Amino acid sequence: MEKAILIRFSEIFLKGKNRGYFERFLFQNIKTALVNFDAEVCKIPGRYEVKNFREEDETKIIERLKQIPGIFSFSPATKIETDFEKISEVSVSMMRELAGTFKVETNRADKHTLNLNSMQISAEIGGRILSTNSNLKVDIKNPKHILHIDIRENKETYLYAKTIFGVGGMPVGTSGSGLLLLSGGIDSPVAGYMMAKRGVKLSCVHFHSYPYTSNMARDKVEKLAKIISSYTGDLTVYMISMTELQEQINAHCDDSYTITLLRRGMFTVAEKLCKKFGKKMIITGESLGQVASQTIESMIVVSEVVKNTPILRPLVAFDKYETIELAKKIGTFETSIEPFEDCCTVFLPDSPVVRPNVYDTRREQEKLDFDAIIDRAMETIEIVEIKAD
């Protein structure tokens, strides 16, 4: 008998002949996430198992497993040889101190070792539990306690009474790599989490306007990247200065187009970074209609500068409340609301254009030596490596 944590897949079960590809990524992601623990990760048919860990590390291991995309659920379990009398003995022991209602659920991946079917096993074990604990009674529909008996093909059985749900989704890395525009606000970290959950391996770009923005704003972004890395693994953050572009826009262009032109500059740089570092997509935290720069007209005008890279907006249909609730859930909200401004607040116009058109925007952009400014912005790249704990 030994302690183990039994891990179940999420959408991997739907992948047919490609399932092995996704399983290998998830297996490696789990191993990487638990590298600092003295624990063994192994694959058993239809599951993963964490075993041989120190008892004092169990809580920390559980917290890490909660943050790994691709895991549907997991359970701290007792593992024993598939033998009916041993299963019965451990089941009775696990339920001995409990009170209230209960039921027993049996899953038989191995249908040959024991002569009883799942319902017969549950009934027999349930009867033995009742005979030793008068504080329990059976409730099939809405029990307070559920004892799970998971009989696997490797001749081992896992018994557990607790199921913890994970992130779900796909293993990070199975859907390619993407570049997240990480602003420091509430939305973009949530967008990064959403795409990691769909299997995207993230890098980030943060645009600053030093000295108009402070080093504290930069520190805030690095803190957010650190939180995101708990779901994605190690992250690279590219720090890019937009100071010259913003100064030139402020000096030469209609101020109502300040944000529109700045965002065109950001997206131009983002595509260049994707090409330079092999990223397959640009990811933003935009939500349709949330602010002036996120009307459909603004999105069209800004997206025009991106020629060969898809732009993904996972929050496009979210309202602010939904985004805030998810930010709280993943742990980024409190950092995101720290009062350190990003570059979008520099030279902010009183009345930004809400529905820009391509022709007027191009006319304003032609007042600048736009390509040369962007090339100089690319020369300001600072690369910050964020290590996941």
Image (tube, grey):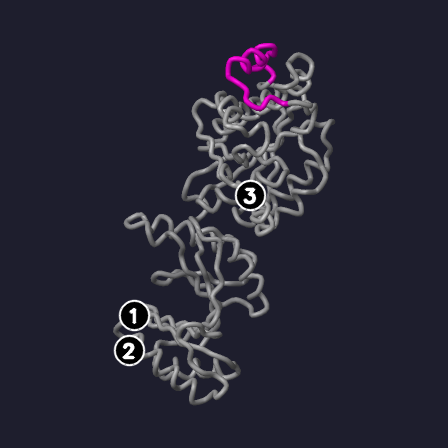
Which residue is nearer to you in this view: 288 or 278?
288
**Between marks 3 and 1, how big is the CA–CA gap?**
41 Å
Q: Are marks 1 and 2 in contact (CB under 8 Å)?
A: yes
Q: Position of residue 311 (x, y in %)?
A: 47, 31
Where does residue 192 sit, x and y in percent of width and height? 53, 41
Residue 94 lies in the magenta stretch: no
Report whether residue 378 is seen: no
Q: Nearest the camera: 132 or 103?
A: 103
Which range of residues does the magenta coloring cover? Answer: 352-373
Q: Nearer the viewer, residue 40 or 170?
A: 170
- Whichever of callouts 2 and 3 sits on the residue coming sooner in the sequence is 2
Q: Which of label 2 and label 3 is nearer to you?
A: 3
- In the rendered image, which quarter contains the N terminus? bottom left
Residue at the image position 38 percent from the left and 82 percent from the top: 125
Residue 110 is marked as 1
- Residue 354 in the image, given as x and y percentages of width and height: 58, 24
The residue that disc 2 covers is 114
Instruction: Say above or below: 162 vs 127.
Output: above
Give the labeled residue for mark 3: 190
Q: Nearer the viewer, residue 198 or 68?
A: 198
Q: Where's residue 274, x and y in %?
A: 49, 29
